Amino acid sequence: MTEALRSFKMATWLGWQIESNWTDPFLFGIYTIAKPVSGALILVVMYSIVAQGGPGNPLFPYMYVGNAFYIYVGSVLIGISWAIIGDREEYGTLKYIAAAPLLMAWYLLGRGMARTIIGTISAVVTLAIGVLFLQVPISPPAVDWPLLAVAMALGLSGLMVMGLLLAGVSFLIARHAGFIGEAIAGALYLFTGAIFPLEVLPAVLRPIGYALPVTYWLETIRRALLGASAAPTFAAWSDAQVAGALAVSTLVWCVISVTYFRYAEHRARALGLLDWQTQY
Amino acid sequence: MQTAVTNAPTRPPFKRRVNLFWRTVFARSYPRLIGMQREKSWLFFEIVLPFMVACSYVFVYKAIGAPHDYIGFVVLGGAMSAFWLNMLWLMASQLYWEKQSGNLPLYIAAPNSMMAILLGMALGGMAATCVRAAVIVLAGSLLFGVTYATANLLPALAVFLLAMVALYGLGMLFASVFLLFGREAWHTSNLLQEPVYLVSGFYFPIKSLPVWIAAVASIVPLTLGLDAMRQLLFAGSGAIGFLPVSIEIAILAVLSVAFLLASKWALDYLEMLARKEGRITERRR
């Protein structure tokens, strides 16, 4: 455990340096908020030009809060999975990391922490814009803080183990044009009810959403912040049931991810992929 | 009487330079085409997953009861986003990546044009991008029942090609600027994704934004290209057009010429500057 914590702590520091020391704090701040705020504003414009009542539409807070916290999904998945590609092909250090006395999985989780911190800043700023300018009804005294804390702890754990799964995939594939973490996060946008209720999806696709911890995480967050969710998806479920589903699905994904990661790491070592240079 | 001796290489004949240009284009696009064959996981990560992102925006419009044309707008915008990403990641920031991996000094030392290298990168990457865009348009249209004004298909194709010339001209310009960048190149490309999706109206008509934003965003060729294509391909969507199609085409033509000329000048100038400041071989900043 001491070795795991040491690997995690060192990687967190390294990840933060890589993410933040390329520019001055002002530009870093702009970079941190411009991308997620733009993503949220795309949805705001879509609602404003089409939906009855624009931001006053009952579905708007549902969408806005889901989208704000969804920032974490991209941040964590990219942070952990890109560390493999970046260390392998940009810095050429993956083979040294593998040879060093540290635990690879904990190292990668630490590398993902920097992006998680940046994601937190982005999510808070996006939420603040929603509350201050777009009438998103979040009132601090009315927030269910214990439920929010449980949701964040379980949800971020679930995202991190999913990131580990993607890191395993990254061990075995070439560098592609985009971030695979971003591609997966984009695809999960469809299935997790982040910006529209699952009922809008064709019935055949809904079970995918029910199998993902992110779906229950976003629902728990909405309940903690807004009091109730506008979507009918989990209307019959109590808060405890939704949080329980989040815990169980996180545990299942943890087993799947760690098993696959171990297999992929072993396979990458066996195939000599730790210093692979794609160069396409 | 002494004859002046110079070490400057003599300029090869025009025909040989043209030949070298196209051979360079082919040579740089070749690894990308072969890479696609060897590493097929891109089919999933670069086509299937981005298609799902476009679907997400379609379902948002379905959830809020948008008119059916808006679903077509999203499908077209989703397809065009592939070209924006291709330009950003496989062209503009690629020289930074090549610098990091040590290829850049080889490109510069070789007797070829950097524009040919960049064009080769663009064409090699475009094969995957075209497949991605085609899948989004075809699958999106079939799944969501999007119909197009087929009478305007050819003019829309012409607008698309013009927008591509301007877009890749802009990509070459970015690439030359990124030549001087370190890790800023990477972050700048990242920063130019969602904000450009927003101001260029990838998922809604650009006319929905304030005029000044739409006007500024028109510097990105896909803004006017998308708007013109939507006006041509969706019957009755002329009312949501930002400018008349003829004016948008004229502006795109001007942008194409301007970006290509500017990129040629910038590549030459910034390559010279990068040589002088020793940034060609600079790595691991």
Image (tube, coloured by chain):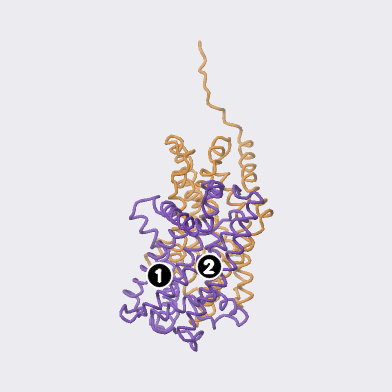
Chain colours: A purple, B orange
Coordinates of residue B250 in the picture (x, y in percent): 49, 59
Query: Compared to B180, does B134 lie above or below?
Result: below
Q: Amino acid at mark 1?
A: Leu
Q: Amino acid at mark 2?
A: Gly
Q: In this rendering, does residue A279 appear at all?
A: no
Q: Nearer the viewer, residue B265 or A245?
A: A245
Considering every residue shown, the one lying at the far bottom of the view is A236
Quick one: label 1, few (<14), some, or many (20+) residues within 10 Å? Answer: some
Q: Nearer the viewer, mark 1 or mark 2?
A: 2
The residue where tag 1 is placed is B209
Q: Nearer the viewer, residue B109 or A23?
A: A23
Helix, strand or loop under label 2: helix
Label number found at residue A186: 2
Coordinates of residue B196 in the picture (x, y in percent): 45, 62
- Number of marks present in the image shown: 2
Q: Residue at x 34, y 71 (%)?
A: A128
Q: Residue at x 51, y 12 (%)?
A: B2
Q: Residue at x 61, y 54 (%)?
A: A174
Residues under labels 1 and 2: Cα distance? 24 Å
